[in-house]
Amino acid sequence: MTILFRATLARLALPLLILAPGAALADVKDRLYDFTDAYYAQNGVVPARIDGRRQVGPLAAETPPNFSYQRPVRALLTLPAYDHSGNEWFFTVLGGLSDEAFAKTSAGVNARRVADASPEYIFPRQGTDPLGLGGFRQSVVLDMRNGYFSNNRLGLWLHTWVNFTPKALTTAGGKKALADLAKKNGADLDGTPILKSVGDVEDMFKKGYVTKTTRPLNDPLRYAICPVIKDPTDGGIAPDQFLAITVKPDGKPLEPQFLREFQALQAEAPKS
């Protein structure tokens, strides 16, 4: 989430704060919890078919939920993301899905439609599994168009792996395109440009400089449940959450703006 966006949120919230000063800490309710079985089923997902469903442990804490549709499993793992326009957000991972996890009901059909229309672009490093979830060269890009916060109630995404092609890496035109984009966005861990928006991905794809690949329908890593923190200010990020961020060989963050923002937001959180 950009500083500009946070300032806009503050201006929008001002009338509410004048009317109800106690609302200043209301964003604690934006902390991310796993959903109840009933809520998953209501929204078209079969709970028993969620792969790696988040449980209490190193990545989640047992905490009383804020809402009846939440389990007492609060996410601690926090990850950074760009949205379709390059704005910065924070999200978590609650599990993976194959096509079989969508119920054979109208709710399940709608859930799969929402997931298919919501690509999560993933950027594996060269030399790692090109369809893997380890060794990212930069933060993910989430296509949050189509009314994400109102229409995507579970935070469903279609994992879409983005890899640079030989045409991008070896031809004069490709090298120039990569250099121009790196000048604008900075370089990733491979020295290739960071892709900060859906527009960046689509432009590179249309020119044949990247591929976009998904896993088979029966693969539990085809889809993901990765809800985004709607408003991380005033407590939306708890003091015990931690940020998993891409780092350089020297241990410094590749995209330090995410760490700065996370630490600033975490400092705003109430300590109790």
Image: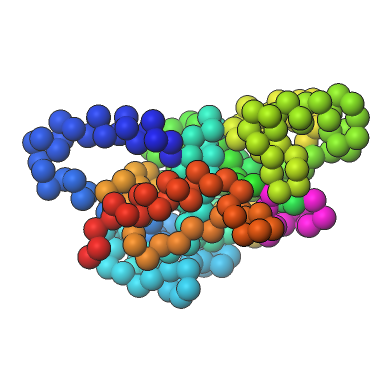
Q: Residue farthest to the bottom?
A: 57
What's the colour scheme?
rainbow
Q: Which residue lies furthest to the right in this view?
A: 171
The image shows residue 229 at horizontal and vertical percentages of 40, 48
Residue placed furthest toward the front: 250
| Residue closest to the far left | 19
Image point 61% across, 48% down: which residue?
A: 254
In the picture, which quadrant includes the N terminus? Answer: top left
Establish if 143 lies above or below 214. above
| Relative vertical location of residue 27 with respect to residue 53 in this rendering, above or below | above
Secondary structure that dominates the magenta span: loop
Q: Which residue is drawn at 35% across and 49% down?
A: 265
Give, as a single range, the part of the protein colored magenta: 126-137
The stretch drawn in magenta includes residue 136:
yes
Foreground of the two, 153 or 107: 153
Instruction: Locate residue 104, reporting x and y percent.
Output: 54, 52
Q: For residue 197, what is the image quadrant?
A: top right
| 214 and 48: which is toward the camera | 214
* The C terminus - image quarter: bottom left
The quarter of the picture where residue 212 lies is top right
Count of all numbered marks drawn on residues in the image: 0
